[in-house]
Image (cartoon, grey):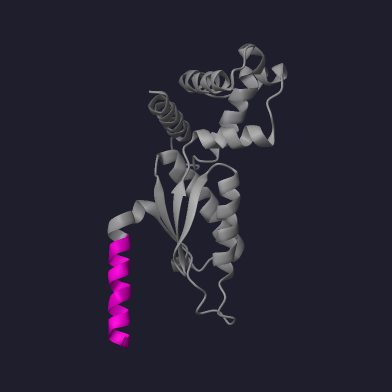
Amino acid sequence: MSTYHRRRLVELKHAFDEARFGPERTLNLRAHLPTAAEAARRADAWLRERQASGAREVLVITGRGNGSETGFSVVRESVAKTLRTLRRLGVVDEIAEHTPGSFVVTLAPMRRLWESARRAAPATDDRAARRTTTLGLEPATVVLLRELAERSLDALGVRDRDAFLEREMASQLALLVRAVPDGADREGRLREVIRRALDEDDERTR
């Protein structure tokens, strides 16, 4: 294949990716030349936010390292490791190599977050958390967070729900805030994430 045809093939593939994913579902790390650690942090935060926003399939572009001295992409390897970690944590469902310099990532449903967290740290009776879980949150946020925690405990078959409710609320909150970047009306955006998780649960149980 000639150089011209190879270039045209690459251009067509880029056009297809833009149509398939669009800017909202594409993280182009290659364009900003981050360090491996920076790339991992950006990928972690972005994928959590995209999961919370309801995205299902996204594209992560790392580059293949052709411009490096070794021809080996440390950014790609760092991001691949982050993806595997996020899969264990319930953020990522599936990882597929799209090209030698990119991954197609299927994000997990929100419920996987708390399922993974419970496997790592089973719930215990911690009534002291009652005084701190909702500190500073608006009443509307507390109501939504409580409903999400109650559903979670019901799904586990917990009978003495009151004994675990505040701890479950604290656990849910700790997971959810990581998916909501700093900025204007962060708590309002947090409520949207909680509503989306509740809607997802409604869809699952229909």
In the rendered image, the quadrant that contains the C terminus is top left
Q: Is residue 199 magenta?
A: no
In the rendered image, the quadrant that contains the N terminus is bottom left
Magenta region: 1-17
Q: Main secondary structure of the magenta part?
A: helix
Any part of residue 16 in sight: yes
Q: Residue at x 47, y 21 (%)?
A: 144
Q: Nearer the viewer, residue 176 or 12?
A: 12
Q: Position of residue 123 (x, y in %)?
A: 68, 25
Q: Residue at x 69, y 29 (%)?
A: 122
Left or right: residue 110 versus residue 5 is right
Q: Residue furthest bottom?
A: 2
Image vertical order of residue 85 relative to residue 79, above or below:
above
Left or right: residue 5 versus residue 151 is left
Q: Residue at x 50, y 23 (%)?
A: 148
Q: Is residue 8 magenta?
A: yes
Q: Position of residue 116 (x, y in %)?
A: 60, 37
Q: Position of residue 180 (x, y in %)?
A: 49, 39
Q: Residue at x 38, y 52 (%)?
A: 25
Q: Position of residue 26 (x, y in %)?
A: 39, 56
